[in-house]
Amino acid sequence: MADKILIVDDDPAICKLLEKVMHSNELETTTVNCGMDALSILKNHTFDLILMDIMLGDMEGFEVIKRLRNQGISTPVMIVSGRNEDYDSLYGLSLGADDYITKPFRPLVLGAKVKALIRRNKNLVLDNSDTLECGPFSYDTTTMRFYKNGEELILSSKESALLLLFMKHPQQVFTKDMIYEHVWGNTVAVDDNAIMVYINRLRGKIEDDRQNPAYILTIRGLGYRFVP
């Protein structure tokens, strides 16, 4: 079965060129022209790699990447952009992009980079368990679903990002600033009350007694600690 590529670009000519390069490398393609369409299709479909432009009609590709990573979607992202400033590549990589290539690109080089990135990601997945387990909680990395004692937890994207952060770092104290950075992104200002609201919502879904939490503990004056 051919690997699947999602192309996100609002320039029809570039989309056709990217499709041609991918097809010449025996890769299947799906193309969308805006960030919201990309976010929508990724809710229900999986891809082996995303080719992302920065300048989209409705939002920057940077924002799309940020939202994907906050939702726990780890599909490799290669930014393909006409912007060649060091800041853009460094910023994209800091948000969770895996590679950055500038337009105009050499088709042979792009094809080789795409296949190498897919191969590297598949090897990484093979080297890691499909399930992250922490106390009574588990996270299926292939379906991006959470469970408690085998029962699925229905979580929002922010609740999912919070729980995944806690499960990856049990017993660690997270300050509100640290939660800002990991869940909302360090360039976004979030009111302290917003974090409290999401913590309480998550407690309502994972705790046996929200008023007396056993898993997400408040460390007065510091932040929160997850005790599985």
Image (cartoon, rainbow, N blue to C red):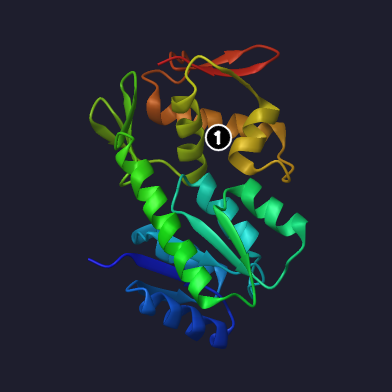
Residue under the point 45% across and 33% down = 164
Quarter holding the C terminus?
top left
Q: Amino acid at mark 1?
A: Tyr
Q: Can you tell which quarter of the image residue 115 is in?
A: bottom left
Of the pair 18 and 168, the residue shown nearer to us = 18
Residue under the point 40% across and 56% down = 118
Residue under the point 41% across and 41% down = 155
Where residue 94 sits: x, y (%)? 65, 46
Of the pair 13 and 35, the residue shown nearer to us = 13
Q: Can you tell which quarter of the image residue 13 is in?
A: bottom right
Q: Can you tell which quarter of the image residue 193 is in?
A: top right
| Residue 144 visible somewhere in the drawing | no
Where residue 144 sits: x, y (%)? 36, 44
Of the pair 175 and 129, the residue shown nearer to us = 129
- The image shows residue 58, relative to residue 15, as above or below, that is above
- Circle 1 packing at 10 Å, graded few (<14), some (14-19), many (20+), is some
Name the residue at the bottom extreme.
13
Quarter holding the N terminus?
bottom left
Where residue 47 sits: x, y (%)? 37, 61
Residue under the point 48% across and 85% down = 16
Q: How many numbered marks does the figure carry?
A: 1
- The image shows residue 199, relative to residue 10, as above or below, that is above
Image check: 70 left or right of 74? right
Image check: 208 left or right of 33? left
Residue hosting label 1: 198
The secondary structure type at the circle numbered 1 is helix
